[in-house]
Image: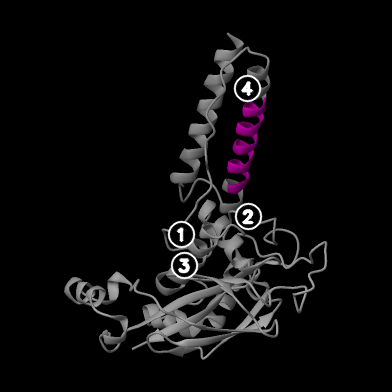
């Protein structure tokens, strides 16, 4: 009887969590009060799950399924005053770059991200928009300061997708425990791409620190280039060659024709511009992300 009652309570509390998350009465509670209520309910869920786990290990009750309450992508527009696990994901993404961190310490700092979109998050979004202004404008043509929509959301989602594809998903820039004789610097950082914009199949130079002299993996939105060397540990020269054109930029007939012709003979429609996020992975971990803009 006790076990059945516990399972019933667990499901009731979990249902309440979803109700509070999805249905937010405008005049019932303030944002801060609602946030506290949700956190309290989540704590009760975890407590009940721990008790069920203890009973399961003793053979008294079956294990309850694990529920995921964490967002994995940005699907809605985000702005000041909103709450949700997508805000938590936003803060984690902003905290990948020291220039756009929500906070240096305390709530919102790396490892202490929250589900509330407050002033600190808004200011971090503004810094992200300012740093990537050219790339965001190339996507949407406009920027709403401090609001995650259109171009801002697209660029952030590209970064999230790239990190999910990489085995090293956290940028922490910590020093390795052992020295690497073929690494020029003990920190992997991508500081600049030159040129910042250009045409189809460009040759670009990545500038930074900590590149492996013989083996780096360069990730872009469309391709992965493996075993790319760096002569001095500070620069990587690479030609971006890809047949994976964004489907939204050419119609089906043009795209099919392009795929059936040699790359050297393909001429893209004029007026097209789209960003390509780039980052480097080697023994030191994962670099920061920079963006190259393809313009036809």
Task: Measure the C-alpha gap from mark 1 to mark 2.
Answer: 15 Å
The secondary structure making up most of the magenta span is helix
Q: Earlier in the sequence, mark 1 or mark 3?
A: 1
Q: Secondary structure at mark 2?
A: loop
Query: Where on the picture, by quarter, is residue 64?
Result: top right
Mark 4 or mark 2, whichever is nearer to me: 4
Q: Could you tell me if the residues under marks 2 and 3 are in contact, i.e. CB atoms within 8 Å?
A: no
How far apart in space, not on screen, are marks 4 and 3 (Cα)? 39 Å
Query: Residue 175's spot in the image, x, y percent?
Result: 79, 67
Name the residue rendered at 68%, 84% in the picture. 234
In what element is the residue under mark 1? loop
Q: CA distance from mark 1 to mark 4?
A: 33 Å
Picture coordinates of residue 264, whole percent (x, y): 31, 86
Question: Helix or strand or loop: what does disc 3 sit on?
Answer: helix
Res 84 seen here = no
Report the quarter where the N terminus lies: top right
Return the residue nearer the eye: 26 or 69.
69
Earlier-in-chain disc, 1 versus 4: 4
Q: Is residue 44 inside the magenta stretch?
A: yes
Q: Around disc 4, counting alpha carbons within 10 Å, would you say few (fewer than 14), some (14 to 19), or many (20 or more)?
A: many
- Disc 1 or disc 2, which is closer to the eye? 1
> SS at mark 4?
helix
**71 with respect to 124 (left or right):** left
The Cα–Cα distance between marks 4 and 2, rounded to whole angstroms, is: 27 Å
Q: Residue at x 57, y 46 (%)?
A: 34
Label 3: how many residues lie within 10 Å, few (<14), some (14-19) or many (20+)? some
Work out whether 221 lies above or below 84: below
Mark seen at residue 114: 2
Q: Between 265 and 108, which is closer to the camera in this rendering?
A: 265
Provide the residue designation for mark 4.
52
């Amino acid at each position: 009887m006790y076990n059945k009652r516990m399972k019933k309570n667990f499901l009731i509390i979990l249902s309440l969590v979803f109700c509070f998350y999805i249905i937010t009465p405008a005049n019932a509670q303030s944002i801060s009060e609602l946030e506290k209520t949700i956190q309290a309910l989540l704590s009760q869920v975890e407590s009940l799950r721990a008790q069920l786990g203890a009973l399961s290990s003793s053979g008294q009750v079956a294990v309850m399924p694990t529920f995921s309450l964490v967002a994995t992508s940005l699907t809605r527009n985000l702005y000041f005053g909103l709450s949700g696990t997508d805000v938590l994901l936003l803060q984690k993404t902003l905290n990948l770059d020291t220039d756009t961190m929500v906070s240096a310490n305390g709530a919102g700092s790396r490892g202490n991200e929250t589900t509330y979109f407050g002033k600190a998050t808004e200011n971090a979004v503004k810094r992200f928009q300012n740093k990537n202004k050219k790339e965001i404008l190339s996507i949407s043509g406009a920027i709403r300061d401090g609001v995650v929509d259109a171009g801002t959301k697209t660029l952030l989602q590209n970064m999230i997708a790239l990190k999910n594809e990489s085995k090293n998903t956290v940028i922490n820039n910590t020093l390795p425990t052992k020295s690497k004789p073929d690494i020029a610097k003990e920190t992997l950082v991508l500081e600049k791409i030159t040129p910042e914009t250009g045409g189809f199949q460009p040759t670009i130079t990545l500038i930074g620190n900590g590149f492996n002299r013989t083996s780096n993996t360069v990730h872009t939105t469309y391709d992965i280039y493996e075993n790319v060397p760096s002569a001095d540990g500070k620069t990587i020269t690479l030609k971006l060659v890809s047949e994976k054109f964004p489907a939204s930029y050419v119609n089906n007939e043009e795209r099919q024709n392009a795929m059936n012709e040699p790359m050297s003979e393909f001429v893209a429609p004029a007026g097209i511009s789209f960003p390509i996020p780039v980052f480097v992975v080697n023994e030191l971990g994962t670099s920061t992300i920079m963006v190259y803009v393809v313009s036809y």
